[in-house]
Structures are given as structure tokens and as C-alpha cells.
Image (cartoon, rainbow, N blue to C red):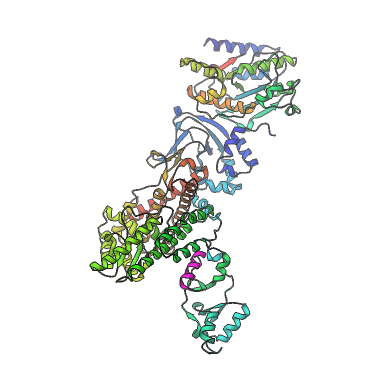
């Protein structure tokens, strides 16, 4: 309860902060979070997100691709799924083995600034969802700084944290790897996808969230406030 | 590359019938417009919005469709569908969908569903409630195997005829002008004879007669004919049995073509015939057993050539018939001629001409009169020899001992009539068990008139015999086809799940039973299920849609049995009628399910029509 109150106030402060520069869509985004704060999640539009990076360190490594897929009225909408490559400095190097994005894929990619503008435009009226959201949001914040913007707090629903809490509540011992996306999905009898790309992972994350919400009492009863985390 | 393509959805959908038949571009569009929802057991029911119909494609989890009253309609798992019946019929769906296991479901909007049905024939066919059409098309894809090809494929288009009052001179001129070796002689458009080269030689020239002779004086009257539906192979058999080279093809008493031995040689459809020829030439049991070892090869060649199941059954039964006849002849060479006329009967699958691998023998004897002790001994020696020999040739002894070697089934015509009359008048359960076997009878060897008398009387007694037909129906309805498949199980109508399915007893046999009831109730002589159905349609004794659906379902299930047996044979497994759902593709599962549905509906009609029950 206390955490929810604190988040609510944080959002209010951010909206009143007129130093919010680019990307200009952020203010609308914060307003959407605030308006829907106590609404059931079924009434809130969500945007599952996954970012592929050259490594796991937001200070050193760079984003190479972003995949997004919205959840509207409690249903995942492949029609509005999008996938973008982002120009990087240097080469994807060995990380290509993980995300499968090659240097040549990045020839017609967006610049970092274009990618950020695109992404924040997409989530003006949506709540971000990611698995291990912290990492993705840190990369976005780092990217804001690198492109000469001011960095701001970002909010997301984190499917990893949801499962972590659920496991703790059940007094389950968490093994290494048991909170990985596929490990979580397996607990909900969701099919395992082998392709590892930003869009597939965004879809996998969206499906996981729907499964989790159903297990937690349904999309009608859970509010955004219960799920949202600040980073 | 389209960046926003969702590989996992596409990968799943492209393996799914009927989506697997769509063009890649269309399938990609499908994957784009669907939405994904998650259903959990806690919600109990899937809320189906009648105002916004859509196709529900199960990606994971398990669901159960039932009527409002709670009667189970279907259990649905990964890769199966629900919610389409309303879109096809335009009626409001009142069925309930229960969530058995949590899972992901793809929703395909009605707009896309309708568009796919309109643009893709195979897609529409898959979902169309007129499932019969789907099965029928399936069988029309089959190639014509040479042995099972019909004579219509090799018949000459043009038929040259002459009237019986023409002169031999005119006939000879016509034959030489058209380069023909025979002419069909007609009278008022109907066939009355045939005139061949051989007739001109033997009946005219050799006798010193002249061309002024009339055709009717030299022709062969009432020649052996064949129907246009006959198989090439049957035409060959008829010619070789009668030692003739010309066979008029007759439809409704009107000649439509002529088949010559040259036509047949050209069609090269010789494999089963070669085998029958070999059987006819063997002079001892050992060599017959050896020749009959080729029967499985023949069967599996026919299967792999994708011949129609009903035709494979006919070919295989012809081989069994020849083998039986040859064995009887061989034994009679040792025993001498029979002391009285008799008829060797075949029952069951041999009777119906739908034998498949592993069919056991069901046979019996009709004797002309009561046999003396010595005469009994003759038939004992004859029948024991033939039955054991058939067993050794690959047609196992009948477990129920319905065999000619059993004295119980060596009956005089009078005794047979009494036996049948008892079964018909007091149809207790064991009598009805017999009925399913004995009422499918066919003469294989001996005196046809004995058989004819028996059949005529039996049919007279069954025709319009409401009590007997009702008892027969009651018995046939004891066994029901499965509802469909659920994952790796077969789903029975009571909701239980079993591991595999016997396609003979839960499929073809049920159709045979239904059709037999109809056939006996109107006194149809045919015993082959397909021919019975055709005769029933001709008499308007059965609803044509039901009949056509049964024909399709019979052929589809039998074909599946055969291909399954073909696979078992190739893997050197024991050949059986048992099939495991895991070995079936998703399309075949759907089609088999439709075939079961046809049987179930036909059983309902039997219940309604013959038991006056609803």
C-alpha cells in the first residue's frame, strides 16, 4: 500500500515537472499511468517490450533491436507488433550469437534518437511490460543520456518480479535460472519458443503476463497499481 | 524480411490443417490479424460472444464443448478448433466451452475466416459442415491403379451395331470397313447377340453357307456381358472363365461398348489376374500354399498404389474365391465327384467382398438333401481339406467355428431355411450375432440354385419384418463410434479416453451393420456394403445424403485401415486394424472424426426409423 502511494505521488511530481524535454511523449505516458493507476488491468492498454543488446552492461553495451507487441482488452494483438533495429557504434561482435542480429541488418537501422522517439510515441497511451524490466529500462535511460536528453524515471510491469514474488509467497526456493523467461513460461504450461529475437521475446513476455494475471485472480480484479514498478 | 513477423505463431499455424494449405502470404496475414488470449480454469467457461464470432484455435491447454444440457460434444486440445459452427451455419452458438486446462487460444476474426473460406477451396472444405464433400474429394484424388481401374477407361467410344435381320454379307462389309473383329447385334436398341470373326469362320464359311445368310442365324445369342462399373480385372476374369474374347458392355439392357481381349492386354492390368491364373494352374496343396504367399504382396502393392479400399477388397476376395474353388477341385480329383449337388457358401468379409489382411474364413455348405453316413464322410473329407488348406494359405480358422468343416454348418437347404427362420422369428442375442455373419452370404462354388432358393426365402422373411429388423437394430446400436481424438487418446462418447482404436469394429463394421439392416428390411440381394447402399439409393429406401455420407465414410475408414496395415507390413509389425492417434496427421484426425460423426448420425436414423425412438 505504501509503495503504491509513493508511486502515485512520484507520477504526480513527474507530470508537474515542466523540465521534461525530449522525448515529448513522456508526459502523456506518465499521465496515462496516473489516470489508469487504480483501474483494473483489463481496462488498461499494455505494451510488451523486449530489447536485444550487445551485452548486459548499460554503460558499455548498446541496444541493437527492440520488439513491441500491445495487449488491448486483455488480448495480445499481433497486428500491431513492431520490430526495429538500432544503429550501433562498432560491431555487434560475439553478441550476434545470442540475438542473431548481424551488422548487415543494421545498415538501414534507426539512429538511437529515432528509436527512442518511435518507442515513446508507441507507449504514450500504454503501460510497458517486460521480463526483467530493470535491464531494458536502464538501457533506455542510458540511451536517453547518450543522445543528450535528460534521463527520467521509467515505469513497467515486470513479469520476472511477478513470478519472483509469487514463488516467495509459496515459500519456494528459487534456483538459478528458475526466473528465466522460458522457465517461468513452463510453470504456466506455455509453449517454449526457440527463436530468440526481440519480437518473439516480447510475445513470450506478453503471454506470460496474461497467464500470471489469470492465476492471480484475473484481469478484472487486479489494478495497475498492484503491478507497476518504478526504475 | 518483414521485421514484425511473429515466428512462433507462424511456425505453429503452418503445420495446422487446413492452414497448412494456404499460401505463405495468406498465412502471414492470418497470423497478423489473430489475437491471443489466455484462459484459465478459474474462469470455468470461455465467454463466446455471439455478436463477434471468431474461430478459436487452441495453442495450448484443453477445452470441452458441451450442449447446454451438459452432453459432451467434443474435447479439444492443442491444434484443434472451436467456435466455427456458428460461423458456418449463421446460427447462434448455444454450446458451452469449459476450460479443462489453462491455455493460450488464438482468435481468428470472422471476417478473415470468411475470406479464407471464400478464397481457398481446401480451407472452406475443411470447415464446411458438409464434411461428406471433403471425404469424397479425398478419395477422388486417388490414382487409378491398373488392376482396379474400371473398364470405362479402356472402352472404345464408338459402338458399331447391326440388326439381326441384316445379311452376313452386310455384316462382313461393315466389319472390314471399320476394321472390327466383332459386331453387336441389336433389336430395338437392345442387345440380342454378338457376331465375331470366329462365328463367320465356324458357322458360315466352314459350313459352306453364303453371305445371304441372316445375322441372327450365325450370331451368338444372349452373350455374356459386363456392366460399365466393372473393373478391368473383373472383365479379364469373365473372359478367361468363359473362354471368350469379346465382352459387350451393357447398361440398362442397352449395349454401350465392347471390350476385347486386346483392349485388356493393352491395359496391362495383369497382376491379380496372374496370381489367380497361377492358383488355377497349381496341382497340389504345397504349391498352392506357396503361391498364396504372394497375396500379402499383392495387397500391399495395391495399397501403395493408393487404389480405392472397396476395390482392393473386391480384388482380394476374388483371389480367395479362386483359391477356394481350386482347393475344392483338387480335393474332388482325389475323392471323386460329390454324391449330390451342394453349394459352398462364403459369409462375413468374404461374403461381402471386403476382405483385408488377416481376414479369417467364414464358410459353410448347403446340401441338396439329407446325407447318408457315407455321403457325410465325403463332405467331411472335402471340407476339412479345404478349410485347413485355407488356413495354411493365410486365411485363419474362424474362431467362432463358422466353417464348412463344422458338421453344424453342413446343412440341407431345408435345414438352412429352418435355421434362418428360427433366427428371424426369435431374434435372441446369439441369433443376432449369427445374423451379422450369415446374412452376408454369397455362393463361391457349386449349385447356384440351392443358394438362390435359400436367399429368396430368407429375404422374403426379413423384408418388412418390423420385429426382426427392430431387434437387429437394437443389436447394431450397442456399439458406437468414438467421438474423436484428444491428444494421443481416442475419445469415447461417454467421455472416457482409450489408447487406440480398432478401425474395423468401431468403423467399417458399424457401417456394415447399419446398411445390412436397411438392405434386409427391403429385401435387397446384394451383400457387398457399397452395392447394398447403391441398391438402397436406387430403391429410395434410404435418405440419399445419409447414404452418400456412409459411402464416403466407409471408403475413408477402410482406406485408413489399409494404409495403416501397409505401414505395419513395411515395418514388419503384425498387421492389425488397431490404430494409435499419435500416428495420425491433424487432417486425418479431423476427417476420421467426421466419418465417425456420419456413422453416429446414421445410427440415429436407424434408431428413429426402425426402433421408432428419438
Q: Is residue B266 above or below residue A157?
A: below
Total labels: the figure holds: 0
Q: Is residue B301 above or below residue B46?
A: below
- The location of residue A110, given as percent across then percent down, is 74, 25
Q: Is residue B176 located in the magenta-colored stretch of the structure?
A: no
**Which residue is drawn at the image coordinates 58% and 85% (left, top)?**
B170
Residue B471 in view: no
- The location of residue B505, given as percent across then percent down, is 39, 49
Furthest toward the left, the residue is: B373
- B396 relative to B138 in the view: left or right: left
The quadrant in which residue B167 appears is bottom right
Q: Is residue A231 above or below residue B455?
A: above
Closer to us: B29 or B356 = B356
Closer to us: B89 or B304 = B304
Residue A41 in view: yes
- The location of residue B150, given as percent across then percent down, is 53, 63
What range of the chain is rendered magenta?
Answer: B227-244
Secondary structure mostly seen in the magenta stretch: helix
Amino acid at each position: 500500500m505504501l509503495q503504491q502511494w509513493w508511486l502515485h505521488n512520484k507520477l504526480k511530481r513527474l507530470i508537474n515537472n515542466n523540465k521534461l524535454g525530449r522525448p515529448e511523449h513522456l508526459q502523456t505516458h506518465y499521465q496515462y499511468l496516473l489516470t489508469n493507476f487504480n483501474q483494473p488491468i483489463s481496462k488498461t492498454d499494455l505494451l510488451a517490450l523486449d530489447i536485444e543488446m550487445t551485452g548486459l552492461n548499460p554503460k558499455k553495451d548498446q541496444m541493437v533491436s527492440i520488439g513491441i507487441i500491445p495487449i488491448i482488452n486483455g488480448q495480445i494483438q499481433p497486428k500491431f507488433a513492431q520490430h526495429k533495429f538500432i544503429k550501433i557504434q562498432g560491431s555487434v561482435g560475439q553478441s550476434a550469437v545470442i540475438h542473431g542480429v548481424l551488422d548487415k541488418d543494421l545498415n538501414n537501422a534507426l539512429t538511437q534518437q529515432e528509436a527512442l522517439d518511435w518507442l515513446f510515441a508507441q507507449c504514450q497511451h500504454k503501460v510497458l511490460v517486460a521480463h526483467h524490466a530493470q535491464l531494458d529500462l536502464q538501457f533506455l535511460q542510458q540511451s536517453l543520456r547518450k543522445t543528450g536528453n535528460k534521463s527520467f524515471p521509467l515505469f513497467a510491469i515486470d513479469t520476472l518480479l511477478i513470478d519472483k514474488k509469487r514463488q516467495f509467497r509459496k515459500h519456494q526456493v528459487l534456483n538459478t535460472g528458475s526466473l528465466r523467461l522460458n522457465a517461468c513460461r513452463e510453470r504456466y504450461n506455455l509453449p517454449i519458443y526457440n527463436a530468440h529475437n526481440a519480437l518473439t521475446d516480447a510475445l513470450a513476455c506478453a503471454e506470460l503476463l496474461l497467464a500470471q494475471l489469470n492465476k492471480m485472480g484475473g484481469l478484472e480484479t487486479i489494478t495497475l497499481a498492484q503491478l507497476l514498478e518504478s526504475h | 524480411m518483414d521485421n514484425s513477423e511473429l515466428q512462433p505463431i507462424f511456425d505453429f499455424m503452418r503445420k495446422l490443417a487446413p492452414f497448412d494449405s494456404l499460401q505463405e502470404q495468406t498465412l502471414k496475414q492470418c497470423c497478423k490479424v489473430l489475437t491471443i488470449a489466455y484462459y484459465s480454469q478459474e474462469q470455468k467457461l470461455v465467454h463466446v460472444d455471439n455478436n463477434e464470432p471468431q474461430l478459436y484455435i487452441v495453442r495450448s491447454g484443453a477445452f470441452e464443448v458441451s450442449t447446454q444440457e451438459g452432453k459432451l460434444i467434443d474435447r479439444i486440445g492443442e491444434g484443434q478448433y472451436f467456435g466455427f459452427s456458428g460461423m458456418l451455419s449463421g446460427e447462434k452458438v448455444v454450446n458451452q466451452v469449459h476450460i479443462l486446462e489453462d491455455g493460450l487460444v488464438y482468435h481468428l476474426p470472422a471476417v478473415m475466416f470468411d475470406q479464407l473460406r471464400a478464397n481457398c477451396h481446401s480451407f472452406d472444405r475443411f470447415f464446411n459442415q458438409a464434411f461428406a464433400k471433403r471425404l469424397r474429394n479425398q478419395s477422388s484424388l486417388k490414382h487409378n491403379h491398373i488392376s482396379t481401374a474400371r473398364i470405362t477407361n479402356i472402352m472404345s467410344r464408338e459402338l458399331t451395331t447391326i440388326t439381326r435381320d441384316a445379311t452376313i454379307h452386310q455384316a462382313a462389309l461393315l466389319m472390314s470397313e471399320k476394321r472390327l473383329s466383332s459386331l453387336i447385334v441389336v433389336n430395338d436398341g437392345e442387345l440380342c447377340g454378338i457376331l465375331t470373326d470366329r462365328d463367320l469362320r465356324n458357322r458360315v464359311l466352314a459350313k459352306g453357307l453364303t453371305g445371304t445368310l441372316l445375322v441372327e442365324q450365325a450370331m451368338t445369342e444372349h452373350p455374356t456381358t459386363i456392366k460399365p462399373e466393372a473393373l478391368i480385372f473383373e472383365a479379364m476374369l469373365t473372359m478367361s472363365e468363359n473362354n471368350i474374347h469379346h465382352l459387350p458392355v451393357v447398361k440398362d439392357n442397352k449395349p454401350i461398348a465392347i471390350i476385347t481381349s486386346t483392349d485388356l492386354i493393352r491395359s496391362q492390368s495383369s497382376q491379380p489376374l496372374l496370381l489367380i491364373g497361377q492358383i488355377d494352374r497349381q496341382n497340389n496343396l504345397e504349391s498352392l500354399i506357396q503361391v498364396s504367399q504372394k497375396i500379402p504382396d499383392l495387397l500391399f502393392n495395391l495399397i501403395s498404389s493408393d487404389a480405392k479400399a472397396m476395390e482392393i477388397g473386391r480384388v482380394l476376395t476374388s483371389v480367395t474365391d479362386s483359391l477356394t474353388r481350386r482347393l475344392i477341385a483338387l480335393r474332388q480329383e482325389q475323392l471323386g465327384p460329390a454324391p449330390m449337388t451342394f453349394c459352398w457358401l462364403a459369409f462375413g468379409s468374404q461374403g461381402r467382398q471386403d476382405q483385408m489382411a488377416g481376414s479369417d474364413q467364414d464358410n459353410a455348405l448347403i446340401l441338396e438333401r439329407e446325407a447318408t453316413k457315407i455321403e457325410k464322410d465325403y463332405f467331411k473329407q472335402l471340407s476339412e481339406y479345404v478349410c485347413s488348406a485355407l488356413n495354411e494359405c493365410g486365411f485363419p480358422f474362424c474362431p467362432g467355428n463358422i466353417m464348412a468343416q463344422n458338421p453344424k454348418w453342413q446343412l440341407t437347404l431345408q435345414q438352412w431355411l429352418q435355421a434362418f427362420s428360427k433366427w428371424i422369428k426369435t431374434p435372441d442375442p446369439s441369433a443376432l450375432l449369427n445374423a451379422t455373419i450369415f446374412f452376408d452370404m454369397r455362393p463361391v462354388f457349386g449349385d447356384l440354385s440351392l443358394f438362390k432358393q435359400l436367399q429368396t426365402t430368407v429375404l422374403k422373411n426379413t423384408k418388412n419384418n418390423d420385429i426382426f429388423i427392430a431387434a437387429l437394430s437394437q443389436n447394431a446400436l450397442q456399439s458406437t463410434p468414438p467421438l474423436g481424438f484428444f491428444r494421443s487418446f481416442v475419445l469415447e462418447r461417454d467421455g472416457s479416453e482409450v489408447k487406440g482404436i480398432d478401425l474395423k469394429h468401431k468403423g467399417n463394421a458399424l457401417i456394415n451393420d447399419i446398411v445390412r439392416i436397411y438392405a434386409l428390411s427391403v429385401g435387397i440381394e446384394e451383400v457387398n456394403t457399397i452395392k447394398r447402399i447403391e441398391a438402397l439409393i436406387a430403391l429410395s429406401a434410404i435418405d440419399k445424403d445419409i447414404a452418400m455420407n456412409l459411402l464416403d465414410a466407409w471408403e475413408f475408414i477402410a482406406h485408413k485401415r489399409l494404409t495403416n496395415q501397409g505401414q505395419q507390413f513395411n515395418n514388419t509389425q503384425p498387421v492389425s486394424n488397431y490404430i494409435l492417434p499419435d500416428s495420425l496427421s491433424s487432417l486425418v484426425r479431423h476427417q476420421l472424426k467426421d466419418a465417425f460423426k456420419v456413422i453416429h448420425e446414421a445410427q440415429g436414423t436407424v434408431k428413429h426409423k426402425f426402433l421408432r425412438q428419438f
